[in-house]
Image (cartoon, rainbow, N blue to C red):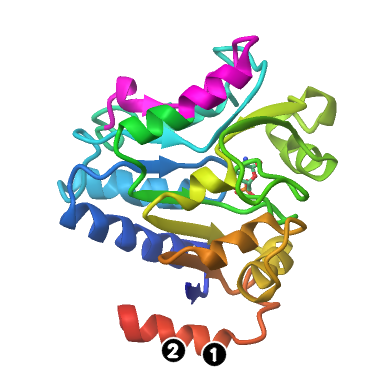
Amino acid sequence: MYLGILDTPELASAAAARIVLAVFKKEPNSILGVTTGSTPEGLYAELRAAHARGEFTLANSQAFALDEYVGISADHYERYRNVLRRELVGSRNTGLKNENLHSPNGLVSNSAAVAAQYDRDIRDAGGIDLQILGIGSNGHIGFNEPGGSLVSRTHVTPLSRQTILANARFFGHYPRNVPKTCITQGLGTIMEARILLLLAFGENKAEAVAQLAEGPISARWPATITQMHPEVYVVTDAAAASKLELSELYQERWALKFGA
Ligand code: GLP
């Protein structure tokens, strides 16, 4: 695991963007795994800017969403597919074509079959090359909440109370308006991506980041499973890194790979 600690979310987003650009420079048609939440917004802005400069495009790529709410209406502003369309799709964004943005369909009643099909779709496309991730303050990635299987596949699952409260800000601050169920890539699915790029900003992520890098691998903190992945980049701001014990060592390792 490489851990980059930048002073601000803006600097961290720029560092994360450099990693994405380097992957696409090497393999222009890479398959990108994309996440939602506040955290990747700066990274997506960097990717749109790089696209505008002609340095990056998703025009020939496919993207797979990490998760989706179940039962949210098709035109809901916070439906993850709609969020990702606004952030990434179109020539004024990153060039990604709408038909090349894949997301689990949370609108159907047989979501278990949809979940199994989603795993097959990822496999049939050749697998995800680079998966962008955020992290919940309880250590979830995607919607893999504490206590779930560390080897799960894409599945339907309830959201924890903590996540419902955290996401209420996207639903007029009313927890009752937050969908109670979601469909998420499983931890086993996420672990098959060739490269993981996880971003975490802010003091409220500090405990989750400390567990992620230094805690024992445990379903209590689902993101800890990424310690078993061969190529993980974690990019944080100073606040999210504030509970790490060995930040100096991580900085040195990062500087050796990317320069200071
Ligand atoms: C959400 C998403 C996750 C995201 C996390 C953190 O519920 N399902 O994929 O990483 O919670 O969100 P934020 O970046 O807004 O803090």
Image position of 154 (left or right of 170): left
Q: Is residue 82 visible?
A: no
Question: Is 114 one of the magenta-colored residues?
Answer: yes
Q: Nearest the camera: 105 or 176? A: 105
Query: Any atom of ligand 1 within 8 Å of the CB at mark 1?
Result: no
Tags 2 and 1 in contact by the CB under 8 Å rule?
Answer: yes
The residue at 70%/63% (across/down) is 208
The residue at 52%/59% (across/down) is 199
Residue at image mark 2: 252
> In which quarter of the view is residue 219 placed?
bottom right
Q: Which residues are magenta?
A: 96-118
Disc 1 residue type? Glu
Q: Is 140 above or below relative to 247?
A: above
Image position of 69 (left or right of 177): left
The location of residue 125, given as percent across then percent down, is: 30, 33
Q: Nearest the camera: 234 or 124? A: 124
Residue at image mark 1: 248
Q: Which quadrant of the picture is home to ligand 1? A: top right
Q: Nearest the camera: 62 or 20? A: 62
Q: Residues within 10 Å of mark 1 (few under 14, many from 20)?
A: few
Picture mark count: 2
